[in-house]
Amino acid sequence: MAKTNPGRFFEDYRLDDVIPHAVPRTVSGGERALYHALYPARHALYSSDEFARSSGLSAAPIDDLAAFHLVFGKTVPDISINAVANLGYAEGRWLVPVYPGDTLRSTSQVIGLKQNSNGKSGVVYVRTKGVNQRDEVVLDYVRWVMVRKSNLDAPAPETVIPELKKTLDVSDLAIPAGLDFSNYDFALAGEPHSWADYNVGEQIDHVDGVTIEEAEHMLATRLWQNTAKVHFDATVRPDGARLIYGGHVISLARALSFNGLANAQIIAGLNGGAHANPCFAGQTVKAWSEVLDKAETTAPGVGAIRLRLVATSDGSVGDLRGEDGKYLPGVLLDLDYWALMPL
Amino acid sequence: MAKTNPGRFFEDYRLDDVIPHAVPRTVSGGERALYHALYPARHALYSSDEFARSSGLSAAPIDDLAAFHLVFGKTVPDISINAVANLGYAEGRWLVPVYPGDTLRSTSQVIGLKQNSNGKSGVVYVRTKGVNQRDEVVLDYVRWVMVRKSNLDAPAPETVIPELKKTLDVSDLAIPAGLDFSNYDFALAGEPHSWADYNVGEQIDHVDGVTIEEAEHMLATRLWQNTAKVHFDATVRPDGARLIYGGHVISLARALSFNGLANAQIIAGLNGGAHANPCFAGQTVKAWSEVLDKAETTAPGVGAIRLRLVATSDGSVGDLRGEDGKYLPGVLLDLDYWALMPL
Amino acid sequence: MAKTNPGRFFEDYRLDDVIPHAVPRTVSGGERALYHALYPARHALYSSDEFARSSGLSAAPIDDLAAFHLVFGKTVPDISINAVANLGYAEGRWLVPVYPGDTLRSTSQVIGLKQNSNGKSGVVYVRTKGVNQRDEVVLDYVRWVMVRKSNLDAPAPETVIPELKKTLDVSDLAIPAGLDFSNYDFALAGEPHSWADYNVGEQIDHVDGVTIEEAEHMLATRLWQNTAKVHFDATVRPDGARLIYGGHVISLARALSFNGLANAQIIAGLNGGAHANPCFAGQTVKAWSEVLDKAETTAPGVGAIRLRLVATSDGSVGDLRGEDGKYLPGVLLDLDYWALMPL
């Protein structure tokens, strides 16, 4: 028996199976500092313990996307090591903030299976949960990937496609216990615009850009213990390029969105997302956002805003798809999420 | 109204205005570790809690220059985003050490204004203060920058040029409370040379060099939440180069100066500094120092030494300016500072 | 007198001399996070405080190799700054785990000297100890290097070659106090293979690879305060290449060995090691292991396994030396160590 992990193939997944993922991880101020070194992150709630306390939290949490990457990274050896494509995300919810000292682990449950008509691969739907040392679910999300079959003779499973919400309702979102933006300091946060200042349909060009280096995306991807070969080993692809982890682009775009959305402090829900085109070192990533929806919440001073976040490699703003309905080549990411901001 | 921050133009500054800067930042051992990864930093007081305790401090502070960069980084969106040039520094004083767990914020006061004769730009002088969570000023310094006008028809303000000390007197320096070098361990610190061993006029070639990579200066500059586009976005300049943040060169040169000035432990004052030539990735940075002055202090076993720190891209030592009085092309930095060292 | 450290030459070493090394260093979660960003490290005991507690430790220690690099880095200015070659390691023992908050310092004792027949250099053997703030020796090891003479007329010292064990016996190994693998969670650790599943002579291809960037190895080497010019300054070598610190390759190979040896949690002993060929940025490092020996220990549920860890630049597996007995050009590292794993 080979000692290395060959990963699961399509025929290895069974509906309702729960897969516990290795390796648990304790985070500290080190992860927080690295997040700030790797991305131009400036949201005050994640930068300053004092600001977080004035908002009703006990300290500055680890960035919501860092928590997501840590939970996601653990799933790679079990879910996507033999994946052909990462097809989508849905129903992502951040339930409990992650603080320095917390230890995270992940599990995934298979909630859907559909063999492709070519018989060579299939789509696997999983709901992944990130859990802390107190057994609290800190976030969960659904993802579906296309996975190769190893044994082409294996019978196709019964097709089950889960019903997934196109968009989370604001009532689906978890608001961190104690969160209170009643005394929010807009000057310290960096921008004067409150929830009321944003209009549905409004587009925001985030202006800034970052030209990506190989060392940066590899440091980040390793930090999340994501081991997919294609991010690290330049001999894997025929063109010698290292494919950048899609989550790196998400974090980069979100951090760039500070300039225009500095007060969209907390990511509370992920409605969906597509890695529209592959990203490689040398590209200059920019971002723009569109306000898709707004809603009130029950927390004092806290509004919810639904945003489309688009990362580009060509600096375009507002363009997403061509006449054929496909993403334009300069679009890297199309993400749909809910954020919490001061009223 | 655009949601992104356009920054202030020359006509937007008013004498005596106090500008509170976003975003507060809590530091931890993560920032300390990253400082050691980004620069060849070895000064024992900042490397070892035990060494710091034996010198009368409660623990190893965050490097003085890391504190400077954190305070400086916050000022960029308000002071230098539309700056044409960073013209100078004066009267920089480190007043209180910064420790893991501290949260820093910054404010700047406009202390001088002078429109240029071309009417298209002007010089803005600000005194910037870094403040911790106990409202203690941890450092302050004066900087002046040339800023573009947006509205060329805006009237010129009254010219006010602040009186600035060419050099801080040793009595202007703040010595950390409790600092005591009476039982200083020279072997653990790395060099046998005490304050008494240095002579005014002495030059020291620090010998070591570092060839800079793009990923390194971007990680550092982001860590300080300095968002100036020109450091990150290779599409900004016509030549496709990313200009390296001047503070990166300061930290690199200071860290290199360990080899010959290992006991110049604490930076207490910044008399002035010039970023003589731009720095780009691929250059090999070396450094040399010159002893400009020496003075006694009231703290036990603690002497003050005034140093010129020069960073070069060509390995030259001792050469600063050409016959025309301008900095030679191989000079990157000319910094004048006070350090504290054991007698 | 020049203020910079010229380092010791062969004639400067005296048998039995004890050399205290600068600079002490306090580690934190920052060093742990950076270790995970720099290497694809996933051993659960070093990743999760909870996993470490369930194994009888108080928290997740800093990676054994990070402790080694920190201790080793301090020796460079005194031992290897004028070294022509790093010849070997022996009798390396990890005695006490290193935790965030600990402060490490190093000392080396000269235990052997042998001038080369050409009279221009000699071999220096030292036993280096890493010591924490409680004066506990956390690790010790023997290393020997070839060092140049500065004064060729200096008389040759009496030749003393220390007797060194070719291989540590399992009884020589220190097992961390309290370590207990009786309730080891193989699913959380990432692989099902216990000590009993490995056979002497078995080879494991670790499959994964990492293409090295300049920024990464420099960040790592600086983090350990290793100042050898050749790693940082591209103007030192005629070919303009920066030689990668051998310890970087050790950590990279060890981290890659997770895939197949995820449960070889703790490095307890270093029997020997050779940096077979120099490593440069752009190379893709892969690794394979061979089981050399197995032994039982007195700790509950804990077995010892002796492993050969080989890093390659050409992806070869199982090949080590050519017909001439020399290492093949694709071999970077040949390391012989003892690890502790669950029975």
Image: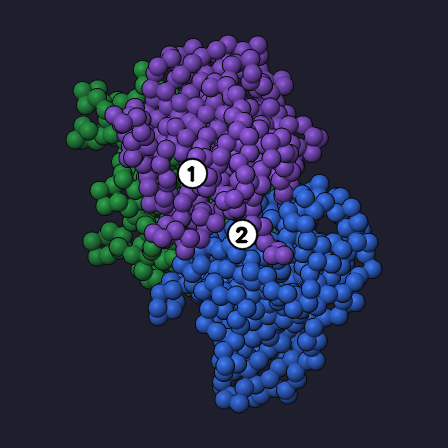
Chain colours: A green, B blue, C purple
Which quadrant of the figure contains the N terminus of chain A? top left
Task: Please tell me how many numbered marks the rendered image carries.
Answer: 2
Determine the secondary structure under disc 2.
Answer: loop
Q: Is residue B83 visible?
A: no
Screen quadrant of the C terminus of chain A: bottom right
Q: Which mark is residue C118?
A: 1
Spatial separation of the CA atoms under disc 2 and disc 1: 39 Å
Local secondary structure at mark 1:
loop
Name the amino acid type tagged 1. Answer: Asn
Identify the image quadrant of residue C318: top left
- Residue in the picture at 65% in, 59% down: B105
Taking the image as shown, residue A42 lies to the left or right of residue A165, namely right
Q: As drawn, is A153 to the left or to the right of A260? A: left
Q: Position of residue C145 (x, y in %)?
A: 48, 35
Judge if badges 2 and 1 mark residues of a common chain: no
Q: Chain of mark 1?
A: C
Q: Position of residue C218 (x, y in %)?
A: 46, 47
User: At x 57% / y 28%, what residue is drawn?
Assistant: C111
Q: Quadrant of residue B168?
A: bottom right
Above or below, B96 against C334 in this view is below
Q: Nearer the viewer, mark 2 or mark 1?
A: 1
User: Residue B184, image x and y in percent?
Assistant: 74, 47
The structure residue drawn at horizontal position 75% and vertical position 43%, both measured from the top left corner, is B53
Residue C284 x/y as whole percent: 32, 39
In the image, which disc is placed on residue B39? 2
- Mark 2 crowdedness (10 Å alpha carbons): few <14, some 14-19, many ≥20: many
- Place residue C205 in its image quadrant: top left
Q: Is residue A331 above or below residue C74?
A: below
Q: Amino acid at mark 2?
A: Tyr
Relative to B13, is C193 on the left or the right? left
Above or below: residue B108 compared with residue A312: below
